[in-house]
Image (cartoon, rainbow, N blue to C red):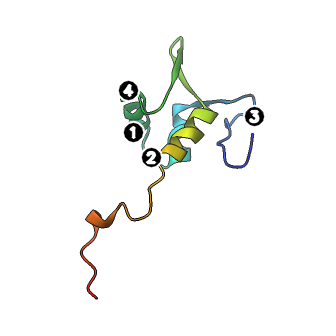
Amino acid sequence: MSDEEPESGDGRGPWMGTPAVARYLGVNQRTVYRLIDDGELPAYRFGRVIRLRARDVADFVERSRIAPGSLANLYPERSS
């Protein structure tokens, strides 16, 4: 796994649990569940356990990148 990809956290494979994903993204675990439910973050259910592939999390991070100049509506007009 490269330095840009999240680690699984347990060293056993490419899978991450929702608490690990939440910590990695810096969000609440409920946000992770919402992202899964909205189809933005692929996840898998193994019995009662939900797991996410580390590479899918890394892909989500890349897709979430903000393009320069796209946040102009969030701050007041700059005066010249």
Q: Which mark is residue 75?
A: none
Label 1 secondary element: helix
CB atoms of marks 2 and 1 within 8 Å: yes
Label 2 secondary element: loop
Label 3 secondary element: loop
Q: Which mark is residue 27?
A: 2
Q: Which mark is residue 37?
A: 4
Estimate the spatial distance between the alpha carbons at disc 2 and disc 3, rounded to whole Å.
Answer: 22 Å
Q: Nearer the viewer, residue 43 or 49?
A: 43
Q: How crowded is mark 4: few (under 14 residues within 10 Å), some or many (20 or more)?
A: few
- The residue where tag 3 is placed is 11
Q: How crowded is mark 2: few (under 14 residues within 10 Å), some or many (20 or more)?
A: few
The residue type indicated by label 1 comes to Thr
The residue type indicated by label 3 comes to Gly
Estimate the spatial distance between the alpha carbons at disc 2 and disc 1, rounded to whole Å.
Answer: 6 Å
Q: In the visual, does 32 lie left or right of 15? A: left
Estimate the spatial distance between the alpha carbons at disc 4 and disc 2, rounded to whole Å.
Answer: 15 Å
Could you say where residue 65 lies in the image, as x and y percent from the top left? 48, 52
Estimate the spatial distance between the alpha carbons at disc 1 and disc 4, rounded to whole Å.
Answer: 10 Å
Q: Which of 77 and 43 is in front in this view?
A: 77
Q: Quadrant of the N terminus?
A: top right
Could you say where residue 54 lies in the image, as x and y percent from the top left? 62, 34
Q: Which mark is residue 31?
A: 1
Q: Residue furthest bottom?
A: 80
**First along the sequence among labels 2 and 3:** 3
